[in-house]
Amino acid sequence: MQLFKAISNTTIYDVCLNTYGTVNFLVKLLVDNNYGSVNKYPLNEQEFIFDETLVLNPKEITKVSEKYATRNQTVGNNINLEDMYYEQNIGIDYTAASDGETVIIIPELANALRIVQLEKEIKPVLVANFSFNSPAGRINLLNGVTMSTGQTLFIIYAKLITA
């Protein structure tokens, strides 16, 4: 476990983004720190522990460690909206039009950060059984995984939302 100190004018979401690189571990952060609610604000210099083994791409966290999810972060007296972002998870469905489909192109997936979860009907598709091309919004099913006519693929993907 590592220690993180919050600064003033931030939220628990900011703490989560600055520690784990994603809000996916928000509940873990709340529980590990006995922090009661997402509606209360961390104090300046308030300490939070986090599990560094769960950090999403530590190299990227170093690059963006001074970015915040909320619009109330200020630099001097000016609000700096350009440096603010958050990760949003979005769910969509895809229904196969023919048997044997292995390449799925969905325009909404173009430039997504990553696929968070992929399920074929009710069964999760392992990460080893698909690849994702973000610029093209293309999912390639691998290792014999195919879609049959009428089967549904449930996709949860992450997008970076900026101010």
Image (tube, grey):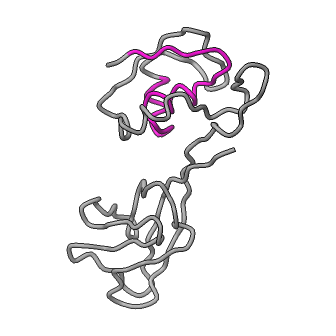
Out of 122 and 14, give the one closest to the viewer: 14
Classify residue 60 by image quadrant: top left
In x, y percent, where is residue 15? 53, 25
Classify residue 133 by image quadrant: bottom left
- Report the residue that reaches farthest toward the right: 77
In x, y percent, where is residue 63? 45, 35
Q: Is residue 160 above or below residue 120?
A: above
* 10 is within the stretch colored magenta: yes
Q: Residue at x 26, y 66 (%)?
A: 129
Q: Is residue 31 above or below residue 47?
A: below
Q: Is residue 161 above or below residue 15?
A: below
Q: Residue at x 43, y 73 (%)?
A: 138
In x, y percent, where is residue 70? 67, 32
Q: Quadrant of the C terminus?
A: top right
Magenta stretch: dominant secondary structure:
helix
Q: Quadrant of the N terminus?
A: top left
Q: Residue at x 51, y 66 (%)?
A: 109
Q: Residue at x 27, y 75 (%)?
A: 145
Q: Which residues are magenta?
A: 3-30
